Image: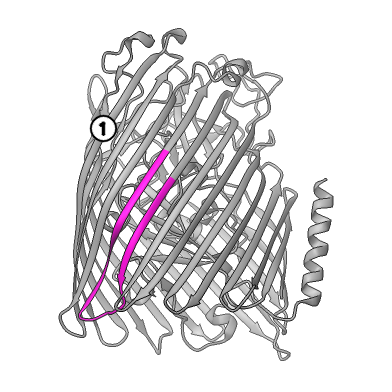
């Protein structure tokens, strides 16, 4: 059936290519590809208005949609190597986002993300962050607190995905990929103006590959489609509407077992770290891996079935001196997954309904005042059943969850930011955001007490005022200095038990409060271009002072139910991030970025007897991250070209647990990607080869320390070496 699907899609796309009258390229061509003598300008929307990267008084890392395609990246978790300040780890359909050390290991419904992701301005819940990327204009990463403009869940930063919009030009493109692990990937896009004022765009993406792990786990089978439209009857109004559907199937990743007694680890199978099916006894009544022949907890082959529907839009009214924008969003998702924490089964059922709307007012003028403000509303209801080590019958009937909960979040906010130009070169900025953040929930740790359960309720509202002040100054025609002081905030949460600690439904009571995370940040930076816009240097120095930072580790021990959240009284993060691009020749571009990030809990006391974990590095927060890239283009006499891209990513190591438990330290590593692309003289087609993680580095992602028998940590691994070929058509 799938082969017929592919043949039909290929035939239709070839027909489109053969008879299409116009050309619409799939990519933004780089400076080296066009042979220009200066670096191209990059437009970002970091401050909720379009401006060039070099004029934005914030640090923004940007990767174009073309760069994602050329490097074979089709989901956000694979883009870690392209950004200096992030770590993205995939668990089933969820991506754990860490930006400069701020994130959460747990993916429970009660916890708001500490670093957030948006698509076309709509917040994406963590359970949908693993959906595939396709027909993307750009991915922007804004490290550091963004609470004034973006609100709660943006204390660590924002990952913003911007899709391509319909344009008034007929055309489209198709991309075909094949590779190891039996990769088959096709993307097809058609853009069509139905009139001079109404244009539509349809995009389809289908990717399948076999599992990276021995059991067949970490196998992808994902189909996505998006339809969008633009209605622009006059210069005074522009309406953009879009709807997407995503199905995530295949087999989610299982954890692999880490062995050892010190911080560093060895893999259960040193010759194949992705072997998750070892029958070697652990001494804890289970083997080291998941295997139907030897695992007493085995309840069936891992699987996942998630469906996500998203609808959104942006409606802009251009009035004298001001643009009014309305950005509504709706997201509905449901799904079930079974994966294994080494030998222990984890079953999860989720259901999410999310609604949001932002009404924004943006000034058209730049001087003397430039401002943006608005109103924001958000509501999300979510059901989650989560279990570790339950039987198949318990999971199918959704009983004895740990936890099983119903959670609702509501947010109302008003925000504004004003920039005043004192002179043509000097500007001052101030911003405020007031929000009411409410969380209501009920549920149970239903497996506690042999199934009697601990039942709890929760209801709390957090009012919050965040602020921002800053200054900036142009230095000549190609330089900018800026400095900002601002606050940040993330909602609190609750524990999965009641304050009395009594078992049974009749003893249900309020759950203990987990305090919200707050911070004040100080940052200053410069942006320069030299040598006729061929050399770009951006640098930011920052210091974050966190209070009550949420520490949400995952505890894989079945007796602990994975349900303990902490507040670190005081946490400090400081560092320096530098980004360099150099167009050495019209055919050669060098990219370098470096991030030193010192992320430490200063005052963090937990346990009985109490232990102070102050001074320890935060989870997934390496001190040093560096990226280096080179792009070279060979131009041929007939107008065709060959592009070579090579990128390498280095980290000096990090910890997977807050208490630096044995086996949970990832040592220093590199990951290198490379691709070679031939582009035809007509621009109508291209072909290439790509490789990712050429070293085949085995790098841990999210996980936990178990300490049962010889089982140390159980961690998901990033993908192994992958490679393949790509063919693209433009029409």
* The C terminus, quarter of image: bottom right
Residue with the most extreme front position: 233
In this view of the protein, which residue sits in the foreground, 66 or 540?
A: 66
**Quarter the N terminus occupies:** top right
Q: Which of the 4 image quadrants contains residue 150?
A: bottom left
**In percent of the image, x 65 and y 31: which residue is there?**
302
Left or right, residue 90 beside residue 469: right
- Residue for badge 1: 460
Q: Residue 502, percent across and down?
A: 31, 10
Residue 145 visible in the shown view: no
Along the viewing direction, whichever of 704 and 126 lies nearer the viewer: 126
Q: Is residue 358 magenta?
A: yes
Image position of 160 (left or right of 538): right
Q: Where is residue 598 in the image (x, y as percent from the top left)?
A: 29, 51
Please say whether residue 573 is visible from this viewpoint. Answer: yes
Magenta highlight on residue 616: no
Residue displayed at 34% across by 41% down = 410
| Residue placed most toward the observer, 310 or 117 | 310
Q: In this picture, which residue range is highlighted in magenta?
A: 355-380
């Amino acid at each position: 059936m799938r082969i017929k699907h592919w043949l039909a899609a290929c035939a239709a796309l070839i027909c489109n290519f053969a008879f299409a009258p116009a050309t619409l390229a799939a990519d933004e061509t780089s400076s080296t590809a066009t042979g220009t003598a200066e670096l191209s300008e990059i437009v970002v929307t970091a401050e909720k208005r379009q401006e060039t990267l070099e004029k934005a008084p914030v640090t923004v890392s940007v990767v174009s949609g073309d760069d994602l395609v050329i490097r074979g990246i089709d989901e956000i978790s694979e883009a870690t190597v392209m950004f200096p300040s992030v770590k993205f780890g995939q668990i089933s359909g969820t991506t754990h986002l860490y930006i400069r050390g701020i994130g959460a290991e747990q993916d429970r419904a009660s916890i708001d993300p500490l670093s957030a992701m948006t698509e076309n301005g709509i917040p994406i819940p963590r359970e949908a962050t693993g959906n595939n990327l396709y027909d993307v204009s750009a991915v922007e990463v804004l490290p550091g607190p963004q609470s004034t403009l973006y609100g709660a869940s943006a204390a660590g930063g924002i990952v913003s995905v911007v899709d391509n919009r319909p344009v008034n030009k007929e055309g489209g493109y198709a991309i075909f990929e094949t590779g190891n692990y039996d990769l088959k990937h096709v993307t097809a896009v058609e853009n069509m103006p139905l009139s001079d004022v109404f244009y539509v765009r349809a995009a389809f993406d289908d990717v399948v590959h076999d599992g990276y792990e021995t059991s067949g786990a970490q196998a992808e089978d994902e189909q996505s489609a998006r339809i969008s439209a633009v209605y622009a009857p006059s210069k005074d109004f522009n309406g953009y509407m879009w709807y997407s559907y995503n199905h995530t199937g295949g087999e989610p990743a299982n954890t692999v077992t880490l062995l050892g007694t010190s911080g560093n680890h060895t893999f259960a199978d040193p010759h194949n770290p992705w072997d998750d099916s070892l029958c070697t006894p652990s001494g804890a009544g289970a083997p080291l891996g998941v295997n139907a022949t030897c695992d007493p907890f085995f309840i069936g082959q891992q699987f996942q079935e998630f469906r996500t529907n998203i609808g959104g839009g942006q409606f802009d009214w251009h009035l004298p001196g001001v643009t009014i924008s309305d950005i509504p969003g709706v997201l509905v998702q449901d799904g079930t997954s079974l994966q294994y924490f080494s030998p222990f089964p984890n079953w999860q059922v989720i259901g999410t309904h999310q609604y949001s709307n932002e009404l924004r007012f943006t000034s058209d003028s730049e001087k003397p005042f430039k401002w943006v403000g608005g109103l924001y509303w958000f509501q999300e209801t979510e059901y989650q059943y989560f279990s570790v080590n339950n039987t198949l019958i318990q999971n199918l009937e959704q009983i004895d969850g740990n936890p099983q909960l119903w959670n609702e979040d509501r947010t109302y906010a008003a925000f504004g930011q004003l920039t005043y130009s004192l002179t043509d070169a000097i500007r001052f900025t101030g911003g405020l955001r007031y929000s009411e953040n409410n969380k209501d929930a009920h549920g149970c740790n239903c497996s506690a007490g042999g199934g009697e359960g601990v039942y709890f309720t929760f209801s709390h509202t957090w009012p919050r005022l965040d602020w921002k002040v800053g200054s900036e100054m142009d230095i000549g025609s190609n330089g900018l200095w800026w400095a900002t002081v601002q606050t940040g905030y993330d909602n609190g949460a609750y524990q999965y038990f009641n304050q009395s600690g009594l078992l049974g439904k009749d003893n249900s009571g309020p759950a203990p409060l987990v305090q919200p995370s707050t911070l004040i940040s100080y940052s200053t930076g410069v942006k320069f271009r030299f040598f006729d816009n061929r050399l770009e240097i951006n640098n930011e120095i920052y210091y974050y002072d966190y209070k009550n930072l949420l520490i949400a580790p995952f505890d894989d021990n079945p007796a602990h139910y994975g349900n303990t959240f902490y507040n670190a009284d005081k946490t400090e993060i400081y560092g320096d991030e530098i980004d360099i691009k150099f167009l050495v020749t019209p055919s050669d571009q060098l990219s370098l970025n470096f991030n030193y990030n010192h992320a430490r809990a200063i005052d963090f006391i937990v346990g009985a007897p109490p232990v102070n974990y102050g001074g320890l590095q935060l989870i997934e927060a390496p001190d040093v991250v560096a990226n280096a890239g080179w792009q070279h283009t060979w131009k041929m006499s007939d107008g065709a070209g060959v592009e070579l891209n090579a990128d390498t990513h280095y980290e000096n190591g990090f910890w997977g647990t807050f208490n630096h438990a044995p086996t949970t330290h990832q040592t220093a590593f590199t990951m290198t990607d490379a691709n070679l692309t031939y582009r035809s003289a007509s621009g109508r087609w291209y072909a290439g080869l790509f490789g990712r993680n050429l070293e085949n580095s085995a790098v841990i992602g999210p996980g936990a320390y178990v300490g049962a028998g010889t089982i140390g940590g159980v961690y998901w691994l990033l993908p192994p070496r992958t490679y393949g070929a790509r063919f693209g058509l433009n029409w």
